Amino acid sequence: MRLIIRNDAAEVGEYIGNYIAKRINTFKPTAEKPFVLGLPTGSSPIPTYKHLIGLVKAGKLSFKHVITFNMDEYVGLPEDHPESYHTFMFRELFSHIDIDPANVHILNGNAPDLIAECKAYEEAITKVGGIEFFLAGIGEDGHIAFNEPGSSLVSKTRIKTLAYDTILANARFFNNDISLVPRMALTVGVATVLAAREVAVVVTGQRKSLALSKAIEEGVNHLTTLSALQMHPWALIVADEDATAELHVKTVKYFKSIERVQEEVEETQARINGQVGGD
Amino acid sequence: MSTSGEQDNGLVCFTNCFLPLEDGTLVERDLWIDAEKGVILDAQRTFYTGRRRPKKVIDLQGNILSPGFIDVQINGAYGFDFSIYDGDDDKYEAGLKMVAERIVETGVTSLLPTVITQERSLYPKLLSLLHPHSFPSSANLLGWHAEGPFLQGSKRGAHAQSFLVNAPAGLKSIEEVYGKDNLAAGEDNSVRVITAAPELEGLMESIGPLSEQGVIFSIGHSTASSRVATAAVRCGARLVTHLFNAMPQLHHRDPSIIGLLGAGGPHSSSLPPTPSHSKKSSLSLVSGALSAKSVRGGGTEALTEGPSAFGTPGGSASPMGANAKSDLHAQIVALGESLEGREAFQRPYYGIIVDGIHSHPNSVRLAYTAHPEGCILVTDAMAMLDPHLPDGVHEWRDGKRLVKNGERLFIEGTDTLAGSVVTMDTCVRKFKVFTSTSIGQAILCATYNPAKCLGIENKKGTLRGNADADFVVLSHEGKVLSTWVAGREVWKKA
């Protein structure tokens, strides 16, 4: 696992945005060989989306042959509700980029048969050859997607009841009335995320710092589902300085020292493969 | 403007533009339309459910994409007068078409041709010609606005005294003048607006029935006292015609029609204009004749049973005098007042001519400050309206000539104003300056507010999904850059 530390949320967004663009451009996706991208919602990825939009508008990136799968959606919330993840994704990303609507996948929280919906979602991921790159954020309790503390670390897409903490945290989006906050969601499982060939997690703000510490400085534990990332062969966490507040100085120093090394390795590899990497 | 994209799928995305929202703010956001159907799209629904996104993208370069302007009071333009019909239907139709085609350069995409007081027998024919029209590549004609002939003589302005009438048989009289079919709500969703003086015989009792069939009653050319004006609004009047003009000036003890802009407080209409005519006493006059039930249903019968001797439209009525004159008048006021309390008092919309001449800038600011949501910009323009017409002397009618000096139009050799020749886009810019408001708020007064008044805010004057794709692209200073009707560009600044 790598941990990249940047000064603030905007720099994190710029870094991870460039990183995703580089992955997509190096992949050279076509209609026959699309790039499959997993996407999160929430405040953490917004700077990343902003940067991606800028790259698309500048002609440096295209989503024409990118297929997306979103992590989660509330159950029972109308698709056009201002707080639905459909609305979020359209507002923050999809409306601004050149993605084909047919390539966008978001779980349907209003499906008559929710279990069938989840099963079909996993099948759709498998059908396109699995997820190439999964971008994620985390909750204050270290949850990834809606895999709340205590979730199985080998879980697949399914219905989840939201933790009380998450409901409280979401109440600000529903007139501060917790009775209006949806109680259930459909979400990809921890194993669905870990099945991606590469996983990158955005962690910004001091409120996420304890979760980050637990996820990377302690053992794999279902109470901090992000910690399962330790089992992934190609994982990246991008954090801002605030989010490192609970980390040991030694941890921070270590990851800072290996950042440059990783870049050198990648550059060498690109030369060997005769590719012009990057954007 | 630049376009990009491969094959066209009929959808268009306007990007790099500011959208004026219904709360007066401007937001930088894309807008999607279906250019084939000529409607605005609910973009998110189109994306997820329709699985479509526009192939064609139009970069508006940071300008404002506003709903097209709506003018609810315009007498003519480019030399054609909506009130002049010489028996030739084709000629009249051609005139309508010409105005509709040319007016788009002023940002207007919908207008309500306004007919001033005519000899009464002309109305049925004239109004039937003014059904809704959508000529290709031109502004929409929404229906008609009949300014007269039920006007108060002393406030008739340029209207011919000899043609003014009142309505002794109430609604029946009004139907006789305009034509019953013209007044009825048809399948063509025609907009019908009547400017009339509610204090005239037979008018007040007709407001309710007219409103029920969708006719918009606008108070104008009237000497209505505060009580009469308030009662008219309670009966259903929803508009005031060219505020400040052809009505009593604002008197603090009886602010008359203008005072409606301050109405709706807890005291509302209950403040009597004179101690001798308190609400209580006027109500008691009719307490026997008017039960709550009869007011709701056929309440007008109780009123028409009364003596027919009634204020003449001759023009002798004064704001206070009208009230004092007859018991019947008190009954009519009571009709309105008895509706009080059923629901919150809704202040009427008001049309206002913001050419800087027909209303002083301070008056415009005063009205807008008092009732911003009710403000509707109107040009009230005459046939001389033509932004290309140079200043100087121009032939008029009856051998008279007019002198045009900017937005001012005088009868030659006099200092008599001959009417307005202001364009709607000029009104928007002037309004913004006079009221120190934002361009977004000024736009509302030429788009969403008139649409709401006419009850067409789901289709016009808005950027909601499924509304008609009628737009004016404005610079941030309010200059018209291009005009679009039903999703097609119909005019572009050279």
Image (spheres, grey):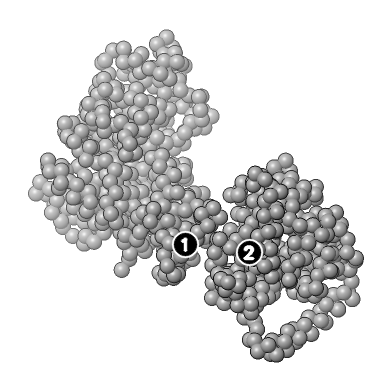
Asked if one can make out residue B63 in the rendered structure from this viewpoint, the answer is no
Report the front residue among A197 and B400. A197
The residue where tag 2 is placed is A68
Asked if one can make out residue A251 in the rendered structure from this viewpoint, the answer is yes
Total numbered circles: 2
Left/right of residue B228 with respect to residue A139 in the rendered view: left
The kind of secondary structure element at disc 2 is strand
Inter-mark Cα distance, 1 to 2: 19 Å
Left/right of residue B43 with respect to residue B449 in the rendered view: right
Query: Percent position (x, y) of residue B171?
Result: 29, 24
Quarter-wise, where is residue A19 in the image? bottom right
Q: Chain of mark 2?
A: A
Query: Percent position (x, y) of residue B476?
Result: 44, 62
Outermost residue, top side = B288
Left/right of residue B451 with respect to residue B342 in the rendered view: left
| Residue pictured at 40% horizontal, 18% vertical | B297
> What type is the residue that disc 2 sits on?
Thr
The residue where tag 1 is placed is B54
Q: Residues within 10 Å of mark 1 (few under 14, many from 20)?
A: many
| Residue pictured at 36% horizontal, 43% vertical | B351
Q: Quadrant of the N terminus of chain A?
A: bottom right
Against B152, residue B25 (above or below) is below
Outermost residue, left side = B399
Report the front residue among A29 and B144. A29
Q: Chain of mark 1?
A: B
The kind of secondary structure element at disc 1 is loop
